Amino acid sequence: MLTLGIETSCDETSVSVTEEKKVLSNIVSSSVRLHKRYGGVVPEIASRSHVEYILEVFKTALKESHRSLKDIKLIAVTNGPGLVGALLTGISLGKSLSYCLKVPLIGVNHVLAHLYSAFLNEDETLSFPFVGLVVSGGHTALFLCGKNYRQKLLGQTLDDASGEAFDKVARILRLGYPGGPVIERRARLAKEKDSVKFPKTFLGKGSLDFSFSGIKTAVLYYVRDRVVSTSYIVHSTSYEMGSAEKPLINDICYAFQENVFNTLIEKTFLAARIHRVKNIVVGGGVAANTRLREKFGEASGFSGNVKVYFPKKEYCMDNAAMVGVLGEELYKRGKRSGLYLSAEPNLEVVNVK
Ligand code: KG4
Ligand code: ZN
């Protein structure tokens, strides 16, 4: 079954052609460079950019798949959560194609597409049940996933998402947007790894919820109290910083990143223990981070019997292939949408028993 996937929930315009879990094409055009100067995604700019590029991305995806439009048997499109104007572009393309080609249309939850994106590796050894962690710019949540794509929310962030914390801390440190990749790079350059320490956020024994606003504020106060004196904040108006501050900024990045990742790992393994599950799956933009992958690998080694799966890096960031593959699986299990499908900016994950 050939599925056309469409993703436009934030700043990536993406169209894919997939067959079962095989990716024939997955074209991603990002408007991230247009948002850099604002320090975050500007919804109106993202929406316009989707309108401008979606047809070209669609044509390229079809061409690279070496299949023709008449071979497409299902259209899967992200219908939430996300920016309403951005979602509408993808949904409009999906509806038009569904109507013209007379093929079914299915709406896919973006968070679930991240959650199940490790299946795109066609890794036969990954099987249900597993504990799934989604770490992206908009979400941080833990799920218990049972067979036939049934999931239950176990915990989620009470304030900032983990990716959002990376973006905000990068902003405090004047490192630019998006924060994740640059903080990862700077953390790797840290020389005095244990020179900076931030407090851990506790939410009560056994809690599987997260909170990242505390660590973000701790970084802000640390910079205000220790780095301002070196004139960094006062005089640095561009994203370039003086050489005197560079080593300290690297150490701050390291301490921040370790702090966030330790919490993610502790809670995910706790969830696996509570629910006696042997598999952990991690998805979303933050899952592209090599240090996070290393640390989960180490924790898996210590645990002895829990295996951790990550999607390939190209499937961590927003992409249509994860939407197409999940859409097809849900369609096969009876899920249907129709031409009445609407954009749902606050679409939630429904627990499925
Ligand atoms: O999944 P995604 O592409 O979009 C959302 O659904 O939000 O995730 C984007 C987020 C951004 O916050 C970005 O800073 C973060 O993922 N990110 C990373 C890395 N690459 C992207 N965070 C940490 N380390 C990275 N290497
Ligand atoms: Zn995403």
Image (spheres, grey):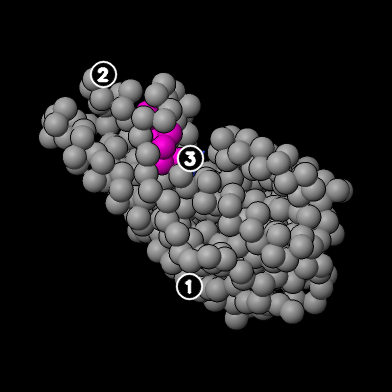
Which label was assigned to residue 103?
Answer: none
Residue of label 1 = 346
Q: Which residue sits furthest top?
A: 243
Instruction: Check residue 253 for magenta coloring.
Output: yes
Is residue 32 placed above or below 104 in the rendered structure? Answer: above
From the image, state whether disc 1 or disc 3 is nearer to you. 3
Coordinates of residue 89 in the picture (x, y in percent): 51, 62
Indicate which disc, 1 or 2, sits on the residue closer to the N terminus: 2
Indicate which disc, 1 or 3, sits on the residue closer to the N terminus: 3
Residue drawn at x 66%, y 37% is 298
The type of residue carrying mark 3 is Glu
Apparent side of residue 162 relative to residue 275 in the rendered image (left or right): left
Which label was assigned to residue 258?
Answer: 3
Which label was assigned to residue 243?
Answer: 2
Evaluate whether residue 352 shows in this view: yes
Q: Tell me how far mark 2 sits from mark 3, CA to CA.
A: 24 Å
Residue drawn at x 65%, y 51% is 282
Evaluate whether residue 35 shows in this view: no
> Residue 291 lies in what quarter of the image?
top right
Tell me, yes or no, whether the two marked residues, 1 and 3, touch with CB atoms within 8 Å.
no
Magenta-drawn segment: 250-258
Residue drawn at x 47%, y 47% is 260
Secondary structure at numbered mark 3: helix
Tell me, yes or no, whether the two marked residues, 1 and 2, touch with CB atoms within 8 Å.
no
Residue drawn at x 16%, y 27% is 230
The type of residue carrying mark 1 is Asn
